[in-house]
Amino acid sequence: MPTESFSRHAQTMPKALSVDLIRLARFANTMLLLLPALFFAAGYYISFYFHILTVASLFLLLVNFSYRHVQKDHALLRNFGIIGQGRYLIESLGPEFRQYLFLNDREERPFNRTERSEVYRKAKNVDSSDSFGTLLDYGATEIKLRHSMFPTREGGVRPFRVTFGNRSGVTRPYTLKNPMLVSAMSFGSLGQNAIRAIARGAARAGIPMNTGEGGYPKYHLMEGADVIFQIGTAKFGVRNSDGELDETALRELANHEQIRMIEIKFSQGAKPGKGGLLPAEKITPEIAKLRGVPMGEDVVSPPYQKECHDVPSTVAFIARIQDLVEIPAGIKLCIGSFKEFHDFVREMKRQNRFPDFITIDGGEGGTGAAPAAFMDRIGLPLYPALYGVVKILEREGVRDRVKLLAAGKLINAGRQLTAFALGADACYTARGFMLALGCIQALECGRNTCPVGITTHDPQLQAGLDPELKAARVAHYVENTQRDLKEMLVATGKCCPSELSVSNLFIPSGSNLWQFVDKEPLLREALQTETESVAPTPHSES
Amino acid sequence: MKPANLLSWILQLAVSAVLVMAATGKLMSRPESVAMFQQLDFDPGGRYLVGALELVAALLLLTPQSIVWGAVLGWGIMTGALIAHGSRLGFQGDEGQGGLMAAAVWIGCTVVIFLRRKQSQSLRRMFARSDDEGRSDAP
Ligand SMILES: Cc1cc2nc3c(=O)[nH]c(=O)nc-3n(C[C@H](O)[C@H](O)[C@H](O)COP(=O)(O)O)c2cc1C
């Protein structure tokens, strides 16, 4: 048979030059036995200096012996000894080498080099124009904005304003003046320098910052920025000893003048169905105190809010918090099933209680630490999720009762405008701000070894992050992204982001939005009629 | 303190003391150590080198983070000393005293390495990280 003869041929075919690693290792292990004797002879007959090598080779011999005959953890070392160590050595440098040398500008994940350098350039306030042409896979997957033949006239763009809490009539409503917000990042996942730098920059740029689920937001409050307090599933900062809501603590926090809104976290895109996770390496005495947890073990939050068993109790819980505080209160979740969300909205309608805002976090979202299985395999991506949510709210006729915030890689104006066109009222980003602080995407957020001092509590590593300098970068990042956004808006001929609709998007069949829409009849119908129609459908007041 | 740690510290102190004494002799060119190194054709470069290494080893042995490395270095120097005595100097007479001392320190270092073997895992971790089989996708 031809295949058989082929394989036999392949086996016996002499290779002109090749390296057989197994033989090489065996040879090295034998030579290692001879080396000390060789050097000893040289030391004896030629010069005593050779004995330095004798000692070194004896040492190697012993290490090799322990690898091959003592340790049992690593089969590779047991079989090949010191030479096998070369694999670990080279592999441990792999990520760095790949990032520095071998990966293309468009290849890295989650953010490729081009995306990152755009943020860096905005943050450093240097020119960010490129030449010659786009590097994107232009035809296949990228969602594009449809521009108009008649761009908006000078002065035609209205200042961005979105007010939270006016519908439910809270005592202290909150008005956003900038479409970009700092998404939830706790003290714990970030170090204090990073938080203070972002907070200072946010204060300067006039945007609010979400505290994340890290307990009392000591460092978030330090720089005078507006703060959105997040109630995580473990309720750090506002929990009693049973792990339930401590109403007085919450009321006290909500009365703080810098705290402008409350966000109740149900799930997070990077790990929906799994609570927050702070690895033991990152727990300092201060964090243990602010969160009220023991040192030396991982802090794992429950995957649910204890009070919420089903749809009615969830709506009731949200209403309870709204009644407790005088500021807008909303929720954050990653969408799993539209049917569930639909039921949720119907229940809100039935109880006539709506959260002041809903944050939709996409499955592509970031995290300080989460199991890879969750990061990779659970949670709808932002665009389809956002679009579905908008459709459900519109179908129930309650789109105007809640504001929608979107999160999930919205680090540049292009992606933010896509979210606006799909129906978002404002855009959250977390990693955008980390990049503005100088994140080099080393992917070590959970190990306390962040080389640029952002996600670490090691004082030596944090020393590299100068809050004042980085605060300026944060502010520049916001301003320059804002400018891009405005210029792109002008190109579409609109006066504010809320005028955009799906008809302003070109959605190629290769994008996940298209594939998703194609499968979901409810959305397909809506999308087809909408992309056909010319008139934009404004979905909220500005 | 655990008995093993106590024993280790006693040995570390003793070994460092001997190392420091030996090092001063070599670095200050005491006649007996000069004579010894001349006999080995290892003077003066080797003498200064060994003296300096002995000081470093003593220092490492007394620093908690690097005990095992100090012991390894001490072990290496003493292995060299044993080779010298075994091949040229012998273990008798005045110089032989030094050889016996070297053997004692060698044993001390070996015991310290054994007692601190947990720390010496970093020997392996220096290359492979703690989440092991390398960093990512190895079998
Ligand atoms: C370091 C880090 C810590 C985070 N901590 C929280 C958190 O405490 N609570 C939360 O709801 N989301 C948290 N997130 C998720 C972000 O708030 C955000 O939803 C997600 O990263 C998507 O935005 P991005 O793609 O712009 O980063 C964290 C993300 C990162 C990168």
Image (cartoon, helix red, strand yellow):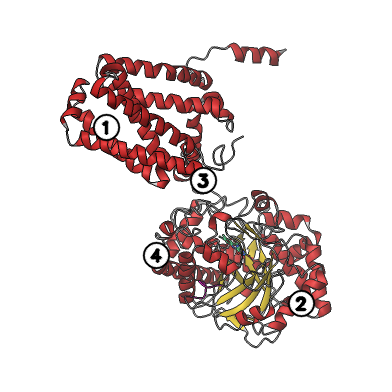
Q: Nearer the viewer, mark 4 or mark 3?
A: 3
Residue A541: where, in percent of width, then height?
Answer: 66, 80
Q: Quadrant of the N terminus of chain A?
A: top right
Pointers 1 and 4 in contact (C-beta within 8 Å): no
Badge number at residue A466:
4
A484 vs A374, left or right, is left
Q: Are marks 3 and 2 on the same chain?
A: no
Instruction: Point out residue A409 in the picture as x, y percentages from the top left corner.
Output: 58, 60
**Alpha carbon distance from label 4 to label 2:** 46 Å
Q: Is mark 4 within 8 Å of ligand 1?
A: no
Mark 2 — residue? A398
Which numbered disc, 1 or 2, marks the residue closer to the eye? 1
Rendered view: A70 above or below B17: above
Q: Chain of mark 4?
A: A
Q: Same chain, marks 1 and 4?
A: no
Residue at the image point whose x is 51% and y is 28% from the top:
A67
The label nearer to you, 4 versus 2, is 4
In the rendered structure, find residue B2 and report the number of the disc placed on it.
3
Q: Quadrant of ligand 1?
A: bottom right
Looking at the rendered structure, whether the residues under marks 4 and 3 are on a common chain is answered as no
Q: Which kind of residue does numbered mark 3 sit on?
A: Lys
Quick check: marks 4 and 2 in contact, CB under 8 Å? no
| Mark 1 to mark 2 CA distance (whole Å) | 83 Å
